């Protein structure tokens, strides 16, 4: 398969790799449990909540790549899993239980024991966009005007993800211009027009940008 893939591997951006912490055979055998069976100790890297979250985002990235590449086996694939994961994670803040569960399973959050996953995501974003990483990332959630956005969704969204939801005006020309202006501003003018027309039958639009400075 010939594919051009841009994957923002958050584990690498954090400056660590799980392989660095795996003990070699010379460091001793796994400690046996009470039954006498050897028990493999958890990699210290994944004991840090933000590192475990970064690994979950990377796993989501692999799933997203497989999905996109299978749809066009000979085509190029350009992805930013971090942008997609951030938008979905932010959206889950306002989702009801069933929808939230579906999103969290897709993001591998169901495998993470963390009472405040969104605060950890804030820490992850701060880490990968630190000045020395030279990465710029931003996201926005846009809602169709007939949808009612809960006030309890806005404050946590801004606190953890640094963004506020936007409501479409209902005028396709105005809405398209606003979206393109937002992308252009976030990309520092590197992209003049990201979208040529508004998607039809739009309810929720997840926007994300990411680039290396």
Image: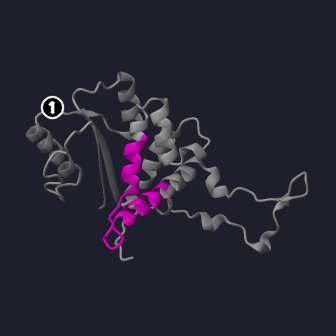
Foreground: 181 or 130? 181
At which x and y percent is residue 184?
18, 51
Q: Estimate how packed mark 1 is, as few (under 14), some (14 to 19) or many (20 or more) residues with alpha carbons within 10 Å.
A: some
- The color scheme shown is one colour
Foreground: 38 or 189? 38
User: Which residue ends up furthest to the bottom in the rendered image?
Assistant: 2
Please tell me whether residue 117 is drawn above or below residue 12 in the rendered image.
above
Q: Is residue 153 left or right of residue 29?
A: left
- The structure residue drawn at horizontal position 27% and vertical position 36%, both measured from the top left corner, is 203
Quarter of the figure with residue 77: bottom left
Residue 75 in magenta?
A: yes
Q: Main secondary structure of the magenta part?
A: helix
Q: Is residue 184 visible?
A: yes
- The structure residue drawn at horizontal position 87% and vertical position 58%, both measured from the top left corner, is 37
Q: Is residue 13 left or right of residue 142?
A: right
- The structure residue drawn at horizontal position 23% and vertical position 54%, both measured from the top left corner, is 187
Residue 12 in magenta?
A: no
Foreground: 102 or 205? 102
Please tell me whether residue 34 is drawn above or below residue 66 in the rendered image.
above
Q: Is residue 8 visible?
A: no
Q: Give the magenta range.
A: 60-89
Q: How many marks?
A: 1
Please tell me whether residue 131 is drawn above or below residue 112 in the rendered image.
below
At which x and y percent is residue 175?
14, 39
Foreground: 151 or 66? 66
At which x and y percent is residue 23?
72, 67
Dot 1 lies on which element?
loop
Identify the residue under disc 1.
Answer: 169
């Amino acid at each position: 398969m010939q594919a051009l893939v841009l994957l923002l591997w958050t584990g690498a951006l954090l400056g660590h790799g799980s392989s660095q912490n795996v003990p070699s055979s010379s460091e001793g055998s796994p400690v046996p449990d009470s039954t006498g069976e050897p028990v493999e100790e958890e990699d210290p890297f994944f004991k840090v909540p933000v590192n475990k979250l970064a690994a979950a985002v990377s796993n989501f990235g692999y799933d997203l790549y497989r999905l996109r590449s299978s749809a066009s086996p000979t085509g190029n694939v350009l992805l930013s899993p971090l942008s997609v994961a951030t938008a979905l994670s932010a959206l889950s803040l306002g989702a009801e239980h069933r929808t939230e569960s579906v999103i969290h399973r897709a993001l591998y959050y169901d495998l993470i024991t963390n009472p405040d996953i969104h605060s950890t995501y804030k820490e992850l974003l701060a880490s990968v966009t630190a000045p020395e990483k030279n990465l710029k990332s931003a996201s926005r959630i846009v809602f169709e005007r007939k949808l009612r956005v809960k006030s309890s969704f806005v404050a946590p969204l801004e606190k953890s993800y640094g963004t506020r939801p936007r409501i479409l005006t209902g005028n396709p020309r105005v809405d398209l211009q606003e979206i393109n202006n937002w992308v252009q501003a976030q990309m520092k003018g590197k992209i003049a027009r990201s979208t040529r027309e508004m998607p039809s039958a739009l309810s929720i639009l997840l926007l994300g940008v990411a680039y290396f400075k």
